[in-house]
Image (tube, rainbow, N blue to C red):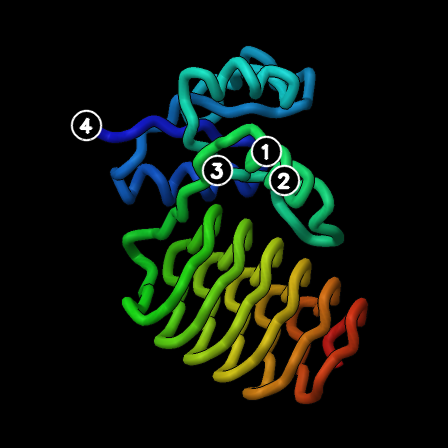
Amino acid sequence: MAETIILVGAGGHARACIDVIEQGGQYAIRGLVDNSPTLRGERIFGYPVLGSDADLPSLLADCRRVLICVGQIETPTIRRRLFEYLCEQGAELPCIVSPYAALSPHATLSQGVMVGHGAIVHAGASVGGNTIINSRALVEHDATIGAHCHVATGALINGNVVVEDECFIGSGAILREGIRIGAGSFIAAGSLVVRDCLPGTKIRRAA
């Protein structure tokens, strides 16, 4: 029998997460939580919106497993706040990996990681907690991705790259092997990055 799980967030990223969970078959989605008042009582792909963040304590009493499904582009603040709160509440934050992803048995995922359809996480790679490895993204051998990051669709993280905590790597971005991306950096879609980036670097257009 599949274990139940609650999804926190009911926007676009949640829809992708629902599909990954359904395809995997390990978890049964009990419902979603979202702070938007317009979504209360609605259904997302057939699953009910159960309430808001304020309802999480009562919901966690019956279902301890949670996946954070809030998207992340400009800032990881909301995802990080939710992660810290859920950990304080004793929630279980499993890793969700698409059955259509390629996850090396020699890779390491921390709690709350989501790996989307067609993504590759190669041998020796490690991914920090509450990070999104989105559809068709590549995390090559021995790369390190920090906590609260989003590696967006089709991004290529080459071997031995270090991406520190709270970074956004946009769709189709390419990071040359062996470089370091400092914490809190934002790398726009389509960027080619060939040298180290200091913490807080913002690359707003492909360059």
**Residue under numbered circle 4:** 1
Front-most of 179 and 129?
Answer: 129
User: Tag 3's secondary structure?
Assistant: strand
State if disc 1 and disc 2 touch (CB < 8 Å). Answer: yes
In the rendered image, which quarter contains the C terminus? bottom right
Q: Nearer the viewer, mark 2 or mark 1?
A: 1
Q: CA distance from mark 1 to mark 3?
A: 15 Å
Location of residue 54 (image quadrant): top right
| 151 relative to 38 in the view: left or right | left
Q: CA distance from mark 4 to mark 1?
A: 28 Å
- Rendering coords of residue 82 (x, y %): 63, 36
**Residue under numbered circle 2:** 84
Q: Report the amino acid beneath label 3.
A: Leu
User: Tag 2's secondary structure?
Assistant: helix
User: Tag 1's secondary structure?
Assistant: helix
- Rendering coords of residue 184 (x, y %): 74, 62
Mark nearer the N terminus (2 vs 3): 3
Location of residue 64 (image quadrant): top left
Q: Report the amino acid beneath label 2.
A: Glu
Mark nearer the N terminus (4 vs 1): 4
Looking at the rendered structure, which numbered label has been put on residue 88?
Answer: 1
Q: CA distance from mark 2 to mark 3?
A: 13 Å
State if disc 4 and disc 3 touch (CB < 8 Å). Answer: no
Q: Nearer the viewer, mark 4 or mark 1?
A: 1
Q: CA distance from mark 4 to mark 2?
A: 29 Å
